[in-house]
Amino acid sequence: MPEGHSVHRIARQFDHNFVGKTVRASSPQGRFAEGAAVLDGREVVSVKAVGKQMFLEADGDVWLRVHLGLYGAWDFAGEILLDPTIASANGRMGQTNQRGTDPDAAIFDDAGENSLASIGAPRRARVHVRMSEQTKGLEDDGSEWPPPVVGQVRLRLMTDVTAADLRGPTACVLQTPDEMLATVAKLGPDPLVGDPAENEERFVSAVRRKGTSIALLLMDQSVVAGIGNVYRAEMLYRARLNPHTPGKAVPEEVVRELWRDWARLLPIGVETGQMMTMDGLSPDAHRAAMASRDDRHWVYHRAGLPCRVCGTQIVLEEVGARNLYWCPKCQA
DNA sequence: GAACTATGCGGAA
DNA sequence: TCCGCCTAGTTCA
């Protein structure tokens, strides 16, 4: 499931391929038929991502709000103008995806090669893009246009050359400008939105005001937007912080360091499409770790395995109905 | 073919 | 605190 980095990636794809264009909208599955009818034929004016929410603005003050939830995914097909900030990682993602082991976003061209790995200005290429954390890479479907509908597609948006299919979202609704602003107002700071200094202060004051455990606070989208279960576990480990520490008991400097860590990790995730949290490793060790889904993290999904640093068994604990992984020694 | 899993979250109890 | 939503891939029988 996407955490904040994926939503920003998707927003960038929309920015480059849909903004400024008229879209055809439909709901092949039927569950968003009314909303699709409203969107159909409108011009896409802008797109923004805040935390795990994406907002697509159509002319006439119509906003589409999408939250992918646990299973949601956007599939892009057709001709894609790649965002230069995410194109640089295509080679790596294409490779991992060919092996079928990469649950993160994947981009690959018709031949399944890495010809899109160029860095710099956006370029046009006939590609099939699957922006999904949950699913493995698709076989390329060739040049069929429009692409055949596969599975439960809640919403399909199409320009003359690009298609985007949405499936399994928790939320897919139309909003007025006021409703959209109200949604954003409920969200905590996102490092990629707004003023950096102000964001940090908002995060620090929200955390230090509460007696709730830092583990719960990091997952609270009104405290900080975009962090999910993976980034939470990894950030707590990186800070060597006990997950049960109440927010108000975490030293201010540690809270600030948590924020700065998130502000560092998120852009890396946006660029690479992967939740890279082990940047302290040597290049060789890092390459080996990233090759396997289960070896990418310090603690996430490593219950019972030895801590990479101290060898203590990683603990799995349920916190707020979610799995929390941590090292009881390093994070004592 | 059933059961299980998942990076989420809102609402009922 | 628990339940239900929602999708698709994987695992197991």
Image: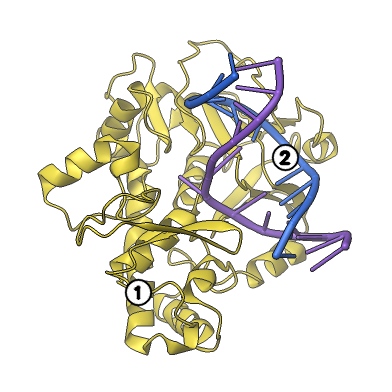
Chain colours: A yellow, B purple, C blue
- Residue A331: x and y in percent read 32, 71
- In which quadrant will I find the C terminus of chain A? bottom left
* A82 relative to A30 in the view: left or right: left
Q: Are marks 1 and 2 in contact (CB under 8 Å)?
A: no
Residue A133 versus residue A252 in the image, above or below = above
* A282 relative to A24 in the view: left or right: left
What residue is disc 1 on?
A241
Evaluate whether residue A318 shows in this view: yes
Q: Nearer the viewer, mark 1 or mark 2?
A: 1
Which quarter of the picture shows residue A178? bottom right
Residue A229 versus residue A84 in the image, above or below = below
Residue nearer the viewer, A59 or A137: A137
Which quarter of the picture shows residue A40? top right
- Residue B1: x and y in percent read 71, 15
Q: Earlier in the sequence, mark 1 or mark 2?
A: 2
Q: Chain of mark 2?
A: A
Helix, strand or loop at disc 1? loop
- Residue A201: x and y in percent read 45, 84
Callout 1: 10 Å neighbours few (<14), some, many (20+)?
A: many
> Mark 1 is on which residue type?
Leu
Residue nearer the viewer, A144 or A15: A144
Identify the residue at image location x=25%, y=35%. A291
> Mark 2 is on which residue type?
Arg
Q: Chain of mark 1?
A: A
To the question of a shared chain for discs 1 and 2, the answer is yes
What residue is disc 2 on?
A42
Evaluate whether residue A60 shows in this view: no
Query: How far apart are the alpha carbons under marks 1 and 2?
Result: 49 Å
Image mark for residue A97: none
- Residue A15: x and y in percent read 51, 45
Residue nearer the viewer, A92 or A248: A248
Identify the residue at image location x=48%, y=39%. A133
